[in-house]
């Protein structure tokens, strides 16, 4: 019986600085999930981290201005860590700086939960590793997701 012809996902995806571009992210991440046999809970963490990072770049880094690019690269670091590198040309912003996490206090109950301001906290919770690097003309955020055995 012939095997199904599967297309390996490209290691890089270039998005435009529009929130609607997030719709292009999902099929790419799901193809990666198939490629690396990523379970649903890990896939959820990947979706959440990438959505938060990219939507923050669009809304805050580029201030909603279209026609800027955001490059997302995926690669395997060792055997068990999937590394996503997100690069932009927005003004400098280090999401790992202590002042960045202090934007919104953690809610103590569901009644106190307000939309917005939780993205960096979520990144820190769901990513296995996070690293930031200021580039000559932009920013690089590296998100490591540890794959289960």
Image: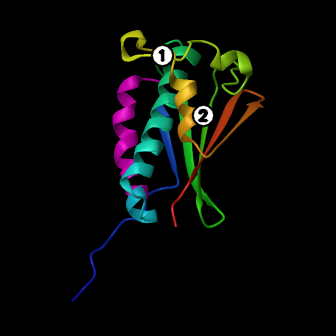
The boundaries of the magenta stretch are 17-32
Query: Which residue is pictured at 40% across the width and 24% down the height?
Result: 19
Q: Is residue 74 above or below residue 111?
A: below
Label 1 secondary element: loop
Colour scheme shown? rainbow
Residue 10, horizontal then vertical, whole percent = 47, 56
Which residue shows up at 70% across the image and 24% down it? 94
State whether residue 27 is above or below residue 103: below
Residue 80, how many percent across, how many down?
59, 63
Q: Which mark is residue 108?
A: 1
Please say if 102 is above or below 53.
above
Q: Residue 59 versus residue 5: which sits nearer the camera?
A: 59
Mark 2, Cα crowd under 10 Å, few <14 / some 14-19 / many 20+, is some
Q: Residue farthest to the left? A: 1
Residue named by callout 2? 124
How much space separates mark 2 and mark 1, taking CA atoms?
18 Å
Q: Are marks 2 and 1 in contact (CB under 8 Å)?
A: no
Question: In the figure, is residue 77 to the left or right of 51?
Answer: right
Q: Which of the marked residues, 2 or 1, is nearer the chain's N terminus?
A: 1
**Residue in the picture at 46% in, 64% down:** 36
In terms of depth relative to the viewer, which is nearer, 146 or 93?
A: 146
In which quadrant is the N terminus drawn? bottom left
């Amino acid at each position: 019986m012939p095997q199904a012809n599967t297309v390996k996902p490209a290691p890089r995806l270039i998005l435009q600085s529009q929130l609607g571009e997030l719709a292009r992210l999902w099929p790419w991440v799901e193809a990666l999930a198939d490629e690396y046999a990523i379970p649903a809970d890990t896939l959820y963490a990947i979706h959440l981290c990438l959505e938060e990072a990219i939507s923050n770049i669009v809304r805050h880094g580029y201030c909603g201005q279209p026609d800027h690019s955001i490059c997302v690269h995926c690669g395997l670091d060792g055997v068990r860590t999937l590394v996503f590198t997100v690069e932009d040309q927005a003004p400098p912003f280090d999401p790992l700086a202590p002042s960045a996490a202090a934007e919104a206090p953690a809610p103590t109950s569901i009644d106190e939960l307000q939309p917005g301001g939780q993205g960096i906290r979520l990144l820190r919770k769901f990513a296995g590793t996070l690293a930031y690097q200021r580039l000559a003309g932009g920013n690089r955020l590296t998100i490591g997701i540890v794959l289960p055995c």
